[in-house]
Structures are given as C-alpha cells and as structure tokens.
Amino acid sequence: MTIKILLADDHQILREGLKLLLNRQEDMTVVAEGGDGNEALELAEVHRPDITVMDVMMPNMDGIEATRRIVDQGLSKVVALSMYADRSFVAEMLKAGALGFLLKDCASTELVEAVRKVIGGEMYLGPSISHIVAKLYVSSIKSPDRREPLTPREMEVLVLLAEGKTNKEVGDRLHLSSKTVGTHRQHIMQKLGLDNLAELVKYAIREGLISFNR
C-alpha cells in the first residue's frame, strides 16, 4: 500500500524539502501541495489523501479551520506542523481532529514516523508537544481555561511585537496596515489580560515563543 500525502504549507521551500523526504520512502508519495487552507481543502476533496500534513498558520484559511473541515468531511487524517509550541495552537488543532502534531524544526526527523503512526491508527505528538498536552490536561482538571484562544494571525503579530518590531514593521512583514496591526495588538492584550508591551514580552518568553536571548 502506498500512503498518499497532501502537503499544505505557505512556505514553498519547506514544502519542497518535505516532499523530497516523503517521496524517498518506498511506501509514501506526495500527491498534491497547497499554499493555504482553502487550497488544502480543495485538494483534499479532489485527491482524497490518506494523510494531510497541515501547517497551522496559513493565509486565507488557517490550518485549524481547514483541518476541522477536512476531518468533518472524512477526507483525510491530519498531521499538524507548527513553528511554535504554543498551547492554544496544540489545543485547537487537536480539537479540530488532527491526530499528529510536531514542530517544523523536527519535521525532517519525525515526520515519517508521525505519518506511519497515524496511518496505523495511533496518535503522534512530538516530545515537546507531549509535554504541552500533559500540562493542558492537568490545567483542565485544576481550573478549566475559558480564555479565548489567539488566532494564528494574532499569534504571528504577538511574536513579532515581542521581538521588538513596531506596528509598521509588523505590517510590512505580514502585508497588513499599521491600523490592522494595532487592532490585532488590542485584541491580543484583551484576550491574554495584558496591560502593556513588557507583559506581552514576558508572556512570549514564558510560553516559549521567543528566546530570552533573542
């Protein structure tokens, strides 16, 4: 049996690297590639892959919503990829139906194993992700978290702001207006219960989104 795989990621270079890795496996073949959530959904409907390797943060439709629709329609099993080991990302992707979750910097060594585990009916969580899931479980027992999760776009803005970039610099990077970045910033602060940029930076460091020695 050949495992048919769909790659969904807005970074073409990463897709090419993953495609080479997967196509080297005798029992795997990449049947299609998409650059955003809308494309992922459309390609899943056409190709009915066994596994969709799904980036969490993509334009037009993020990976969380795309995963939810793909799983709800029974089109494919999903393995999630993310640059960030963020609790909200992990929780929302698993709620959406992803059966695997790993970080992009581990993808080359873990992805093949993750695909085989998920095809075999198991879940696959990278080591750092397993730690996050355990913490989420413990937290849910002690005090259920009713905080509204950040969207993938808000997470991108948060990381860039925490790295010291101005609203304009963030907007230039993400192709947004400074006003839109300001709106995202306000929503981030409200959702996380933060009062200023210093608290935002501390939050990003505590959650492992940026390094203290950045």
Image (cartoon, grey):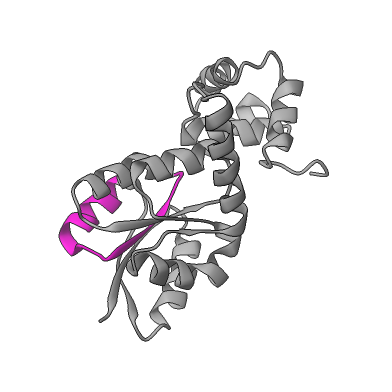
Left/right placement of residue 73 relative to residue 9 reads left
Residue at horizontal 45%, vertical 66%? 114
Q: Position of residue 126 (x, y in %)?
A: 55, 59
Magenta span contains residue 11: no
Q: Magenta stretch?
A: 38-57
Q: Determine the residue positioned at 41% across, 45% down.
A: 94
* Figure quadrant of the C terminus: top right
- Number of labels in the image equals 0
Magenta includes 54? yes
| Residue at x-position 17% and y-position 55% | 45
Query: In this rendering, would 140 be left or right of 68?
Result: right
Q: Which residue is drawn at the image coordinates 62% and 16% (left, top)?
A: 193
Q: Nearer the viewer, residue 86 or 47?
A: 86
Left or right: residue 148 compared with residue 103: left
Q: Is residue 41 visible?
A: yes
Toward the right, the furthest residue is 213
> Residue 184, position in %: x, y?
52, 22
Q: Is residue 172 visible?
A: no
Measured along the vertical axis of the image, is residue 8 above or below residue 97? below
Q: Please, which residue is most extreme toward the bottom here? A: 26
